[in-house]
Image (cartoon, rainbow, N blue to C red):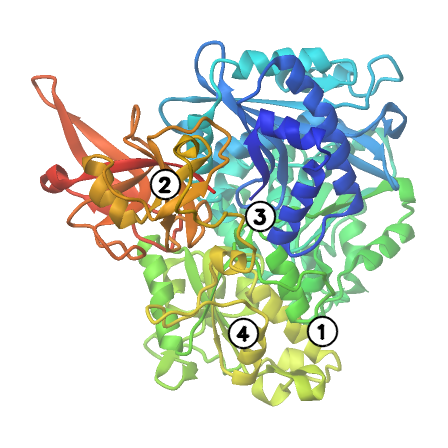
Amino acid sequence: MRLYEGTIQEFDRDITQNRIADIAQERFRTYYHKSPSESEYRAWQQSLNILNNSFRYSGLKDNKLIVEYELPYSTRRIDVLLFGKDRFDRDSVVLMELKQWSNEHIYDCEAEGNIVVDFHGKKEVAHPCLQVEGYHFDLQDFLLIFREFPPVKLSSCAYCHNYSRLKKDVLFQAKFESAVNKFPLFVKEDVKALGRYLQDRLKNDVGFEVFNRFITSPVRPSKKLLEHTKEMINKQQIFTLIDDQIAAFNAIMHKAKHLAKTKKKSMVIVKGGPGTGKSVIALEVMAELMRQGRVVYHATGSSAFTNTLRNIVGRRAANLFKFFFNFTQHEDNEIEVLICDEAHRIRANSNDFRVPSRFKSHNPQIDDLIRPAKLSIFFIDEHQIVRPKEIGSIALIKQSAKRFGMDDEDMAEFELKTQFRCSGSDAYLQWLDKMLDVRDSDISYFDAKMEFKFFDDPIVLKKEIDKKNQEKENCARLVAGFCWPWSGPNPDGSLVNDVKIGNFAMPWEPKNAFWRWATHRSGMEQVGTVYTAQGFEFDYIGVIFGPDLVYRESEGGWISRPDKSFDSMVTRNNPDLTAHLKSVYRVLLSRAHKGVYIHFMDKETEAFFRSRMQIKRTVAEPEETLYVSDILSNIPSTVDELLYDIPEERKWSEYLPVYSLKAAAGNFGQGMNSEPEGWIKADIGKKINNRLFVAKVVGHSMEPLIPNDSYCVFRWGVQGTRQNKIVLVQHSSISDPDAGGSYTVKKYTSKKRVYEDESWGHESITLLPLNPAYAPINISDSEEGEFMVIAEFICVL
């Protein structure tokens, strides 16, 4: 997502006309279906205006830029990106983080790497150069453009335009020198210095080609926690932390560093919704403290999660991963650091019948966790409580801390808001919370970034999950509400097909090895419950929404049906059953990175979900999928009407000819001799010439860059390399699923073969869609002679 893009000259014009913030605001509303906050709107007005002064000093005019670029798999946005070539003639991208902070609102902080900012209340945050570092490496991690040839140089900096070097200084203290040297910090007095910095990195080219490479760059799969846990614990930091994650990590490490200097206990609470990185920080903290030689333990209330972690890290480190009940016999302050993940699963005490006798205790379980540790760290989401006996809350934790003599200054609290799961869509999670009435939200629209499919038949749903696992093993799972009995294995060890819906029949995860379900390949043929799924993440999740929770508008909304549930521990004497079941389905529906596939057993509940989604259905799609263009379809078109009679002098100066793709492919490839369908005004931010034309691209395969039914500008012939460019091609073997003919618009990639005589040929040509729901088109060597690249994509009007 990009709230604003254009050239620096266009940016200057919109600044001069005082409309830059209005443009960003309108696109924000279109994309997020809500208005930006007043503070964000003011930030666009003020910060972008001041930034423009440095642009003017740099002398850059035609360079491409983006304002508010959303990071892959995240809700965080980079303020500004600029494109060009540096003084060594290398493709170059500059990343900028803008801050309105002034000296009067910034204070020093004890935690190394953090500062305290006082805007509407004091808050501990990472130094701006450390924030930039997070964005820098996150972008490099996920966008393949930074690993392609020719290489692209990424430079990143922060600009605090209201902060002065001449007043009370916090940001340039010696302890921040390393960060500032790596990722420069420009302040109020540095307008010219910033201009020179940009000029040095961008002046040799307007950056149009690298801009196109950037916005069409493939995105690497997001890192999965369990795939890297062993490496994290035993070797090095794996995940790039950003923003609020950095501040929480720094605060924890600071408190751990000073344990020997105080006899008082201390505590850090980190709260956040699904996919905000709580478990990532927990394990990164544990690994770093272990490397420092600290006595540190990791504990959860989830047997599946803890046993999986034990299995992954190996025998040597397995004994460091415990359950909440394992600390009842420890002495006071015996442990340096205790990390409690999934702290919402803390129970009233450790006297449950499942607790081994040597660990049983009638003390509050929270007291048994805080008492043995000098530093207690709690990661919590109060909306993920799925059983009546789970009582973990921030209030409960703080009450216990007070009993052990901790004051407010001994306790730090952080909230993680950046979303990394659900295709990086916080809007999806807010929509889900509103749907299930878990908490109120101003998000009422489904976010098209998250793939969401309805399935009438659970057999078809299972086949779709199987397909994903065939493409990448263990990337998808099937889960369900606890609406069937859970049997033990048959005498021969085989599992009983308990989960039955018509002709569909599958077993639950095995009772004697349920913790293997999320990671072992056998889990692909089993149905998981919330108790084995909670804490884990997958690319795709298939959810069977059972009849234990139904929506009845005539009866006021969500209703629990205990007679349809086989989870006796939840249904027995539980006045809050409906709330617990809503939390169960919230957990199940928030396990995926890329897509949620769902089968509803209750059709009225399904109808309620469907009524809250904008869905487009075609004959070719028996299941319903939400596309980007379905959201964009209600946005008024900014393309002018076609004109048929315009003066010759305005052709290719203000107006471009419009052709169908078929006409373009059939005529432009052999010379531009076809009559256009009309002419259209084209303000594309660069000089128009007679090699340019406009064509409407139909279909979803190139979304989100090219929405369905978009008018696009193309340039006949491709200058330079075709590699990684979006092109219009023609070939007799192509049967494009969108265009329906032997021509298509796709991203061009190829592999070359060099022969002994030093000549070369194509080993393979692949035409890539940007929408992962579409398959690539492969052109074999024998077919290459019939293959023709007609034109290069320039932009969407």
Q: Which residue bears the numbered disc 1?
A: 388
Q: Residues within 10 Å of mark 3 (few under 14, many from 20)?
A: many
Looking at the rendered image, the quarter that the N terminus falls into is top right
Q: Nearer the viewer, mark 2 or mark 1?
A: 2
- Give the CA distance from mark 2 to mark 3: 43 Å
Q: Amino acid at mark 4?
A: Arg
- Give the CA distance from mark 2 to mark 1: 67 Å
Res. 471 image quadrant? bottom left
Mark 1 residue element: loop
Mark 4 residue element: helix
Q: Amino acid at mark 1?
A: Pro
Q: Which residue bears the numbered disc 3?
A: 420
Q: Earlier in the sequence, mark 3 or mark 4?
A: 3
Which of the numbered marks, if any, corresponds to residue 632? none
Q: Residue at x 49, y 68 (%)?
A: 615
Say above or below: 56 vs 771.
above
Q: Residues within 10 Å of mark 2 (few under 14, many from 20)?
A: many
Q: Amino acid at mark 3?
A: Phe
Q: Nearer the viewer, mark 1 or mark 4?
A: 4
Res. 305 image quadrant? bottom right
Left or right, 657 with reference to 584: left
Q: Residue at x 72, y 18 (%)?
A: 186
Q: Earlier in the sequence, mark 3 or mark 1?
A: 1
Q: Which residue bears the numbered disc 4?
A: 610
Mark 3 residue element: loop
Q: Earlier in the sequence, mark 1 or mark 4?
A: 1
Say above or below: 586 vs 558.
above
Q: Nearer the viewer, residue 712 or 680?
A: 680
Residue 204 x, y percent position in the rendering: 48, 13
Q: Which residue bears the numbered disc 2?
A: 657
Q: Residue at x 81, y 46 (%)?
A: 332
